[in-house]
Image: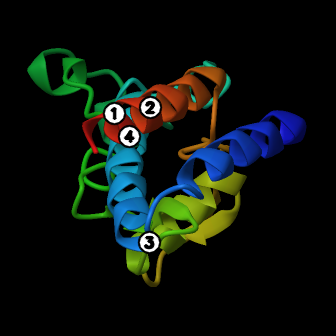
C-alpha cells in the first residue's frame, strides 16, 4: 500500500508542479472535498477502508427483553462526526489533509485504534473495538486520480 501511495504522490506531484501555487491550492482543495465526501459515505455505510463492516454496538441493558419501535430503530454510528462541520479539509499547494480536529479528533482516535476511554466524564471506562474511520482504499486512490484529472481539465 505504501508503494502505491508513493506512486500516486509522484504522479500527482508531476502534474501539479506545472501549475502556479494558487491553482495548485484550488485543485488540491477540490480533490480534498471529493475525498472527504468519499470518506463520509464510507463511514455512513459503517465500513472500514478494507470494506469490512464495523463491529456492532454493544447491546444496551435497558433494551434487553423489549420489543417495538425503540428496539428496532438502530441509530447509525458516527452520524454527527461524519458531517463537514467535524470532518475537516485542509489543502495547501503541497498537501491535502482530511481528518477530525478538536474534541471530535479524540473520539475518532479512540475508535480508529480501538482504545479505552470513559463513556461519561465520571463513568466507567470501556475498551472500544477498532473501527477505522479514515483510511485510503483502492477506490479512494482511483477517486483521487479521477478528481485530479477532472479538476485540472477545468483549469
Residue located at (53% from left, 45% from top): 133
> Taking 80 as reference, is 109 left or right?
right
Are circles 2 and 4 on residues that touch, CB within 8 Å? yes
Q: CA distance from mark 1 to mark 4?
A: 4 Å
Place of residue 68 in the rendered image (x, y in percent of width and height, measured from the top left): 13, 15
Residue pointed to by mark 4: 152
Residue located 35% across and 30% down the image: 150
The C terminus is located in which quarter?
top left
Which residue in the protein does label 3 denote?
A: 21
Q: Which residue is mark 2?
A: 149
> Which element is circle 2 on?
helix
Assess whether mark 2 and mark 1 are in contact (beta carbons under 8 angstroms): yes
Residue sitting at x 62%, y 30%: 49
Which of pointers 1 and 3 lies earlier in the amino acid sequence? 3
Q: Which residue is mark 1?
A: 153
Q: Which mark is residue 83?
A: none
Amino acid at each position: 500500500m505504501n508503494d502505491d501511495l508513493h506512486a500516486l504522490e509522484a504522479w500527482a506531484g508531476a502534474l501539479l508542479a506545472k501549475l502556479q501555487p494558487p491553482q495548485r491550492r484550488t485543485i488540491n482543495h477540490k480533490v480534498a472535498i471529493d475525498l472527504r465526501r468519499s470518506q463520509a459515505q464510507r463511514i455512513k455505510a459503517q465500513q472500514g477502508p478494507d470494506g469490512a463492516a464495523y463491529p456492532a454496538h454493544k447491546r444496551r441493558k435497558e433494551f434487553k427483553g423489549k420489543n417495538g419501535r425503540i428496539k428496532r430503530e438502530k441509530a447509525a454510528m458516527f452520524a454527527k462526526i461524519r458531517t463537514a462541520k467535524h470532518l475537516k479539509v485542509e489543502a495547501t499547494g503541497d498537501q491535502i489533509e482530511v481528518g477530525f480536529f478538536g474534541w471530535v479528533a479524540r473520539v475518532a482516535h479512540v475508535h480508529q485504534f480501538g482504545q479505552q476511554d470513559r463513556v461519561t466524564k465520571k463513568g466507567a471506562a470501556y475498551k472500544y473495538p477498532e473501527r477505522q474511520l479514515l483510511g485510503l482504499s483502492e477506490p479512494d486512490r482511483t477517486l483521487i486520480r479521477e478528481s485530479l484529472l477532472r479538476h485540472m481539465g477545468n483549469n
